[in-house]
Image (cartoon, rainbow, N blue to C red):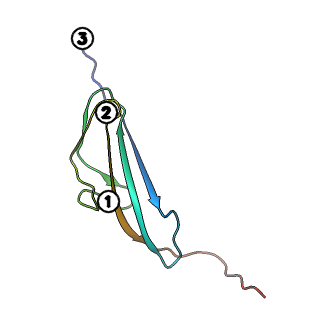
Amino acid sequence: AFTDVLPDITVTKDASPTSVPESGGDVTFTIGVINNATEAVTLDSLVDDVFGDLDGQGDCVVPQSLAASGGSYACSFTRFVAGDFVGKLVLAP
């Protein structure tokens, strides 16, 4: 008898710096993927909920093979991030 081992990965996304002025600035995002399963997996795609398909962005490239039980892959890309502060301007006397 065989048991099908389902993929089990952990994905992280870290930003540096973690804040920018309202006018914006470059932020480097580092993506990490760890294989928690007991067999190797192939990372066929890497898609971010904000920046979309990361293949070819920065040093991110797929496919990637991740070894069983802790195999990992990391990559990074840089984007300009700007915002619009929604708040009240308070002037000092």
For marks 3 and 2, give the CA distance. 19 Å
Q: Is residue 78 above or below residue 70?
A: below
Residue where numbered disc 3 is placed: 1
Q: Residues within 10 Å of mark 2 (few under 14, many from 20)?
A: few
Residue 54 in the image, given as x and y percentages of width and height: 29, 57
Residue 86 in the image, given as x and y percentages of width and height: 59, 75
Q: SS class of the residue under badge 3?
A: loop
42 displayed left or right of 83 = left
Residue located at (72% from left, 85% from top): 91
On the rendered image, what quadrant is the N terminus found in? top left
Viewer-nearest residue: 61 or 46: 61
Instruction: Identify the mark nearer the N-term, 3 or 2.
Output: 3
Q: Quadrant of residue 36?
A: top left
Instruction: Identify the mark nearer the N-term, 2 or 1.
Output: 2
Instruction: Identify the mark nearer the N-term, 3 or 1.
Output: 3
Residue located at (28% from left, 18% from top): 3
For marks 2 and 1, give the CA distance. 22 Å
The amino acid type of the residue labelled 2 equals Pro
Farthest residue in the left direction? 63
Farthest residue in the top direction? 1
Q: SS class of the residue under badge 1?
A: strand
Residue located at (27% from left, 28% from top): 39
85 displayed left or right of 79 = right
Q: Residues within 10 Å of mark 3 (few under 14, many from 20)?
A: few
The amino acid type of the residue labelled 1 equals Gly
CB under 8 Å between discs 2 and 1? no
Q: SS class of the residue under badge 2?
A: loop
Residue 82 in the image, given as x and y percentages of width and height: 46, 74
Name the disc covering residue 7, or none: 2
Residue where numbered disc 1 is placed: 52
CB under 8 Å between discs 3 and 1? no
